Image: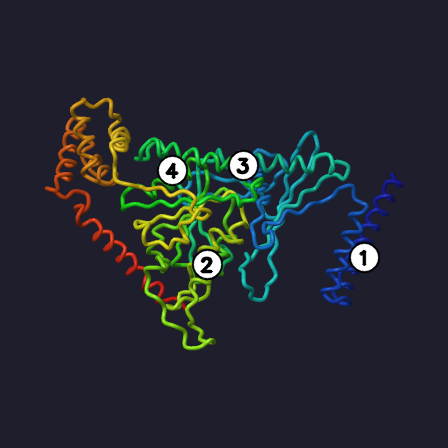
Amino acid sequence: MAERKESWTSLASLLGTLAFCQTFLQTFLQVVLPPELRHASLKFLTRALRCFSSYCYFDVAEMDGVNTNELYNAVHLYLSSFASTSASASRLSLTRARNSSVTTFGLSSNDSIADVFNGVAVQWEHAVTQRQSQPSSWRSVPDEKRGFTLRIKKRDKDLILNSYLDHIMDKANDIRRNNQERLIYTNSRGSESRGRPWEAVPFKHPSTFDTLAMDPEKKRDIMEDLRDFAAGQAFYQRTGRAWKRGYLLYGPPGTGKSSMIAAMANFLGYDIYDLELTEVPSNTELRKLLMKTSSKSIIVIEDIDCSVNLSNRSKAPKAPPPQSYSAPDASNAASGGKDWNNNTMTLSGLLNFTDGLWSCCGSERIFVFTTNHIDKLDPALLRSGRMDMHICMSYCSYPALEILLHNYLGSEGEDLSEAAASELREAVEKAKMTPADISEVLIKKRRNREKVVSELLEVIKARAEGKEEYGGLREKCESNGVEEEEQEKRALESPQRSQRP
């Protein structure tokens, strides 16, 4: 009994001595050594101790230079998939996006979780530290520095490291495909100063290629093109091309351009980045936005002909000649500088955004432009390599009408009488009504399914004969109506531009 008491006394004395030495060493380092030398000394001691450790450590930072680290996102998804059921995680963070019904589990700051792969135990730690204040630079960074640290025994590193990381990437891709909630991002001026240039909300648009009112053969061509693109990594790498593709959707308002974009996103399982050009003050900011987009995404610029001054240069008024070689307002829109109306977002910057060297900073991206007037766009925007596929979203045809009848009434074309089908086919080709016009009729009349087809036929015939206006302007006024709509958009956007610094 006396020996045990002496042992405990000796142990307590040893622990007290170690605590005193630790306190003394910390005080000595803080007083004697400057912060830079103290930090270097601690780093050296940490590395020296790791030489005698049986573990090796791998850091996965959130940011890879100026780009988001795809491996970080994959690890985050992978660990979130089993964090709620893991017994090794003592603290979890719960998040739920706005307008979302899905709760996401994740590791809390500086907490750890264990995993097993091929019989080998590993450990992940979520490291979150405050980023030191930095002088203003050309890019904004988040206030917090985030990352994951992987701990593996040295003897297992060569055995599982590469295959384990491949496993994580594959599982993350499966989670993205199975996750029904897509995200739609938008850019705004204020978010860039906070280090988050894109703001996201869940994307719940129900449009699919099955419900899209379009000629079925054209839809099949688009779907095949999308499948080839998504499965074309080896092809693009073999041919030396950037893994991206451009689609131009053009046609009158109400023909389903936005629904087409939603159907593409739901078909591929991609997120959407809705780029508002009026919120982009310069070409530099445009490049920074591109670098913050992720792979497997669709970058959309809607109504590009009236977003900023990017119209056809051959039809646009020429800029006044510069007064001197040093004139700050010299016309240089085509070469990428400021244009003559002091707008620093230029056509050259947009071209480089879609097809220049900066467009290759990511992979598996789709660019989609929409316009009501393709003839107003500069030819440089339309060439292959930028907009690879031009899709005309035209007025409603009879095959598209059959899809609309099936969507709203559960009745396909073959359920109609032969006489009614023949009359509809003949009238709809002459009426030049958009799918939005016909959808409005079907929505209003959906409670009376017995009469809806006959009333729809009357409306289409009246439109075809030019005796009645419905759901829009007559054909002879349509071009003027579109012009007025675009002038309204420009008028609404002009105050925003005038307020820019």
Report the residue marked by disc 2: 349
- Residue 287 percent coordinates (x, y): 50, 56
Report the residue marked by disc 3: 173
**Residue placed farthest to the left in the image?**
467
Q: CA distance from mark 1 to mark 4?
A: 67 Å
Local SS, label 1: helix
Q: Is residue 115 above or below residue 66?
A: above
Q: Is residue 112 above or below residue 18?
A: above
Q: Is residue 493 left or right of residue 270?
A: left
Q: Which mark is residue 21?
A: 1
- 2 or 1: tag closer to the N-terminus: 1
- 2 or 4: tag closer to the N-terminus: 4
Report the residue marked by disc 4: 263
Q: Are marks 4 and 3 in contact (CB under 8 Å)?
A: no
Instruction: Please state which amino acid type lies under the numbered disc 2.
Output: Gly
Neighbor class of circle 1 (other Cα within 10 Å; few <14, some 14-19, many 20+) is few
State which mark lies toward you, 4 or 3.
4
Quarter occupied by residue 24: bottom right
Q: CA distance from mark 2 to mark 1?
A: 61 Å
Local SS, label 2: helix
**What residue appears at the point 31 percent right and 35 percent down from the top-left corner?**
214
Instruction: Please state which amino acid type lies under the numbered disc 3.
Output: Asn
